[in-house]
Amino acid sequence: MKQYEAFLLDLDGTIYRGSQVIPEAVRFVQALKREQIPFLYLTNNSSATPQVIAERLTAMGLPTTEKEVYTSSLATAAFLRQRLAPGTPLYIIGEAGLRTALEQADFVVDDQQPQAVVIGIDRTFSYDKLAVASRAIRQGALFVATNGDAALPTERGLAPGNGSLVAAIRVASGVEPIVIGKPNKWVVDFALQRLGTKRERTLVVGDNLHTDIEAAANSGMDSLLVLTGFSTIDDAHEHPVRPTYTASDLWSWWTK
């Protein structure tokens, strides 16, 4: 097995399931910290700030700092900083995680003449927001989405994800968005910049073939599929993009 110098770790289904941490994942992360191997938790979650996610993980018994968390909102802010000047007006549909990331990147909120429309999950999404966003995009505003996840797992089953909101705006505006999160490479590239490690020596880890494993493939990186969440071993055999490794859980892979 190749020796990796760093890891990009998915969260839901990889480190925890719902509100329950996965014990084998805790042991794996503890081993990384003990051996001082750098890693980032890499999530498509755009609603929460890194601080909130870190506090959630810490409460689960996995002490975490916000610097160890990288979200699709942070990647979206980094993407926009490459293309727009500080102070550029944006129309934002999203929650605290996205708004905080964009404000800290020195963008301003403006629903009158925005130069970009930025979409993250928003559980107060409305017809009025759809109308403002689609009108701005038709008038030339850049259309950027934090991620394209169609559904989100909840305790009551799957709920509409950001991809569902993005689809409505895409149909209303007639414009395809730039999507930053997994499985697209943008979020991985920016996470690698944060880590400061080489692409070929960093392993992408996750439970979802369609997001985590495809993101690794799109970024030219090796991947590990753990069977603690969304995708099954049968899925792995049938999916057109194959993980580099497959394991029942993180600890069994680490000690293999």
Image (tube, helix red, strand yellow):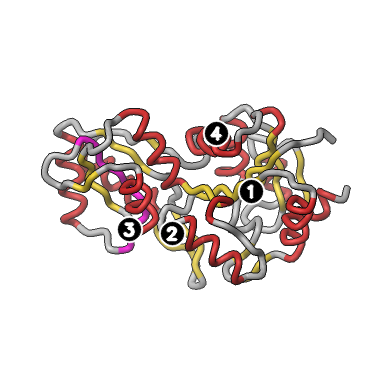
* 146 with respect to 235 (left or right): left
Quickly name the residue at label 3.
122
Assign a secondary structure to mark 1: strand
Query: Mark 1 or mark 4: which comes first in sequence?
Result: 1
Residue flagged by tag 3: what amino acid is it? Asp
Assign a secondary structure to mark 4: helix
Which residue is more in the foreground, 55 or 131? 55
- Screen quadrant of the N terminus: top right
Quickly name the residue at label 2.
48
Separation of residues labelled 4 and 2 (CA atoms): 21 Å
Point 11% across, 44% down: residue: 112
Quickly name the residue at label 4.
193
Question: Of tags 4 and 2, which is closer to the observer?
Answer: 4
Q: Which mark is residue 41?
A: none
Assign a secondary structure to mark 2: loop
Point 72% across, 61% down: residue: 26
Q: Quadrant of residue 49?
A: bottom left
Query: Mark 2 or mark 3: which comes first in sequence?
Result: 2
Separation of residues labelled 1 and 2 (CA atoms): 17 Å
